[in-house]
Image (cartoon, helix red, strand yellow):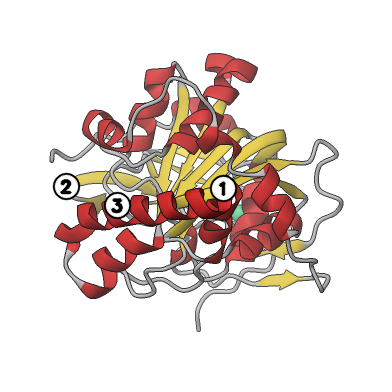
Amino acid sequence: MTTPTPEPLAPWTDALVCPLDRTQLVAEGAGWRCPACGFASASTVVEGAARPDFRALDVAQDAAYTFRIPVAPLDREAVARDYFRAVNADFPHFSRAEVRRQFGTKLDKGIQYYCQQLWRERGAAARILDLGCGQGGNRRYLRSLGFEHVVTTDWIAPGADMLVDAHRLPFADATFDLVISTAVFEHLYNPYLAMHEIARVSQPGGYFLGSASFWEAWHGSSYFHLTPDGWHALLSANDMQLVDLWPGWGIIPAALTHVLTPGYLRGVGYALQSAVEALYRLALGERGVRRLHLRASGAYVVCGKKQISGLAGERISSGRAAEHHK
Ligand SMILES: [Zn+2]
């Protein structure tokens, strides 16, 4: 596969802020500089192409966090009854194999549903952040819908227009109508801090579409694998509402792919999963299948929405007194 070409950041200049103190950045030479603290973007070569790098790797992050416990868990019956909406809706969409072949990504039916919903609500002008973009296939899908303003970011990946740290995003408050982050959250050190940042850069009413592995405990470096209640807690702690939830893939193909055998048995896993679900459907109805998915899935996918009222207050002050590593 050829290395994707990063897009110029010119359309995002107004939204670029210092990851350390959120002062608006100014262009300087080929990069950006913070007039307040002197932070300057670096340039890092990824697979032969230089990317602007806003991770501030030499500056430690200093975060204070205030939170309330307990968060009430999701109501199991309500989830089985009210969620799974997007994946059960009838609308034109790409199959998993088609979306992979055409765009080089794994966006599932549910994510396609809410991307199309955003298109109806906001059209081409919507501003979208792909957080953890990998090869950048999500943007190719979003462009096919007509979206024009998509910025791709990653810790380090060839599809990224810019390299960022999800725990201190270099974007101004309320910049985005959608933050999409697929198969990323299990790789983050501090999911609460990252979700706080996502909420901060989201417009009121903006969407969050995210997936995280539940089952594959040891793939790459992964730390916090999310359950449905885990997603609910992350979102609700940041004034985001869990709008919908569904399984990314079943526990059986996930187990066959990641635990018992190499990936070539994935297809067998999908077939076995379908057979088990058919039995559950016969015996317990669609609700029974949903309860099965809520007990265990390979991954969970969510749609969240930032509350129109916005953040109730600044819960985290991040990096305001950033100190250099000793
Ligand atoms: Zn600064």
Describe the element under mark 1 as helix, strand or loop. Answer: helix
| 296 vs 102, nearest the viewer | 296
**Residue shown at the point (30%, 35%) measured from the top left:** 6
**Residue shown at the point (21%, 56%) measured from the top left:** 268
**Residue shown at the point (30%, 57%) measured from the top left:** 272
Does residue 11 appear to the left or right of 43 in the view shown? right
Describe the element under mark 3 as helix, strand or loop. Answer: helix
In contact (CB < 8 Å): disc 2 and disc 3: no
C-alpha distance separating marks 2 and 3: 37 Å
| 287 vs 165, nearest the viewer | 287
Residue, disc 3: 270
Residue 160's mark?
none
Disc 2 packing (10 Å; few <14; some 14–19; many ≥20):
few
Residue 48's mark?
2
Residue 212, image x and y in percent?
47, 58
C-alpha distance separating marks 2 and 1: 53 Å
C-alpha distance separating marks 3 and 1: 20 Å
In contact (CB < 8 Å): disc 2 and disc 1: no
**Residue shown at the point (41%, 68%) measured from the top left:** 215
Residue, disc 1: 285
Q: In which quarter of the image is residue 141?
A: top left
Amino acid of disc 1: Gly
Question: Is the CB atom of the residue marked by disc 2 within 8 angstroms of ligand 1's nearest atom?
Answer: no
